[in-house]
Amino acid sequence: EADIYQTPRYLVIGTGKKITLECSQTMGHDKMYWYQQDPGMELHLIHYSYGVNSTEKGDLSSESTVSRIRTEHFPLTLESARPSHTSQYLCASSELEAVREKLFFGSGTQLSVL
Amino acid sequence: DAKTTQPTSMDCAEGRAANLPCNHSTISGNEYVYWYRQIHSQGPQYIIHGLKNNETNEMASLIITEDRKSSTLILPHATLRDTAVYYCIALYNQGGKLIFGQGTELSVKP
């Protein structure tokens, strides 16, 4: 089993609040990802990181920000939550082994902004 | 990274082989074909990947055509628990970012 954890699992919050979604992995993986997914829709890459102090924007524009101060930790922050941010957020880390890049996903955070 | 095209949905009878096709006609020589699946809003799960040779593991087999423009994921004896969305992705190894398309929604029926 992969050791990647996301908290909280569910979050209901009011408009305008600042929130941070936590993602931690204990596998020592350098590469980490954040995806956003609405019910029944495809996953959209919103952020990724190649390692400490590296952050890149993904293919879907997002008002969220990320940081990577430690290898094991890749939190995602929304400065002012809005109903349009309601979605599932999935964090992943990547194992690079020889010629294989294998992603391990957390259980996700289901965010509802009222 | 090359674009992939998959059917939106497929059905398969329990116990039969499920053959999921994927087109990647613009794939370049050093892009690998990866398959993941996602069961009901859980995080996607790695299944298998390959470059040009056919691959097999405990979960599935991957058949890649000689020209590498298409591939097929084979679940040899599908079970109800294989009902999921299956994603085919072309990726430069260690330099790319995994972009998931719409995938194929496989329904395994009793």
Image (spheres, rainbow, N blue to C red):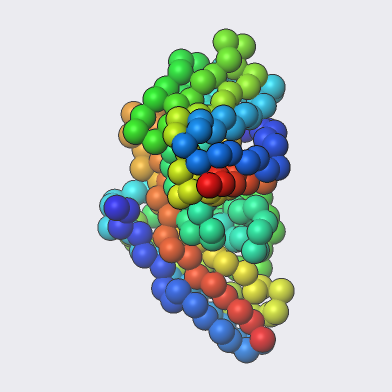
Residue B58 lies, in percent from the top left, at 34, 33
Residue B25 x %, y %: 69, 22
Above or below, A25 relative to B55: below
Residue A96 vs A74, above or below: the answer is above
Measuring 56% from the left and 84% from the top, which residue is drawn there?
A12
Q: Quadrant of residue A44 in the image?
A: bottom right
Whether residue A104 appears in this view of the structure is yes
Q: Where is residue B105 drawn, in percent x and y?
A: 62, 46
Q: Residue at x 41, y 68 (%)?
A: A6
Q: Is residue A57 visible?
A: no
Question: Residue A78 vs residue B36: left or right?
Answer: right
Q: How many marks?
A: 0
Of A39 and B79, nearer the camera is B79
Between A79 and B56, which is closer to the camera in this rendering? B56
Residue at 29 percent of width and 53 percent of height: A1
Please tell me which residue is depicted at 35% across the width and 59% down the height of the picture: A4
Q: Is residue B20 left or right of residue B48?
A: right
Nearest the camera: B21 or A71?
A: B21
Q: Is residue B76 above or below residue A11?
A: above
Residue reaching furthest to the bottom: A14
From this viewpoint, which residue is outermost toward the front?
B110
Q: Position of residue B21 (x, y in %)?
A: 62, 29
Quarter occupied by the N terminus of chain B: top right
Pick whichever, B89 or B84, lies toward us. Answer: B84
Name which quarter of the figure residue B26 lies in. top right
